[in-house]
Amino acid sequence: MFLTRIGFNSRAVITGDVTQIDLPRNTRSGLRHAIEVLAEVNEISFNFFQADDVVRHPVVARIVQAYDVWEAEDARARKEAEKRRRQEREQSLNASQQSAPTEEKQP
């Protein structure tokens, strides 16, 4: 690992963008893992930038914002789809229970 090779009187700047991880869903990012593991090490600091901090071409900030909006909408759509699936399963279960023959009690 690169971090274990840092020598005396040296500094290292590691850059990365946790919004641009191209790993499959539910696969842990090395960058996110390093942030978690090293968060409490006093000699290490993390700086997190927002879209407003982008100093490149203005379209880059708009791209970052567009992806933020898309991710929020995608998460909302996934939740709604899951809710619809749950409701459909419940309706199907209720319908099958209602159509099942019931035993009549004899006096």
Image (tube, rainbow, N blue to C red):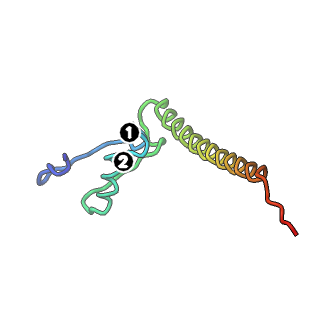
Crowd around label 1: few <14 · some 14–19 · many ≥20 (10 Å): few
- Rendered residue at 69%/49% (across/down): 87
Residue 16 x/y as whole percent: 34, 42
Residue 81 x/y as whole percent: 63, 43
Residue 58 x/y as whole percent: 48, 31
Residue at the farthest bottom position:
107
- Decide: is 47 above or below 22: below
Q: Which residue corresponds to mark 2?
A: 28
Q: Quadrant of residue 105?
A: bottom right
Which amino acid, mark 2? Answer: Arg
Q: Nearer the viewer, residue 30 or 14?
A: 30
Residue at the farthest right position:
107
Q: Quadrant of residue 18?
A: top left
Q: Is residue 13 left or right of residue 100?
A: left
Asked which secondary structure carries label 1, the reply is: loop
- Rendered residue at 33%/53% (across/down): 35
- Rendered residue at 43%/38% (across/down): 54
Q: Is residue 29 left or right of residue 10?
A: right
Residues at circles 1 and 2 in contact by the CB criterion of under 8 Å = yes
How many angstroms separate mark 1 from mark 2 (CA)? Answer: 8 Å
Residue at the farthest left position:
8
- Rendered residue at 65%/49% (across/down): 86
Q: Which residue corresponds to mark 1?
A: 23
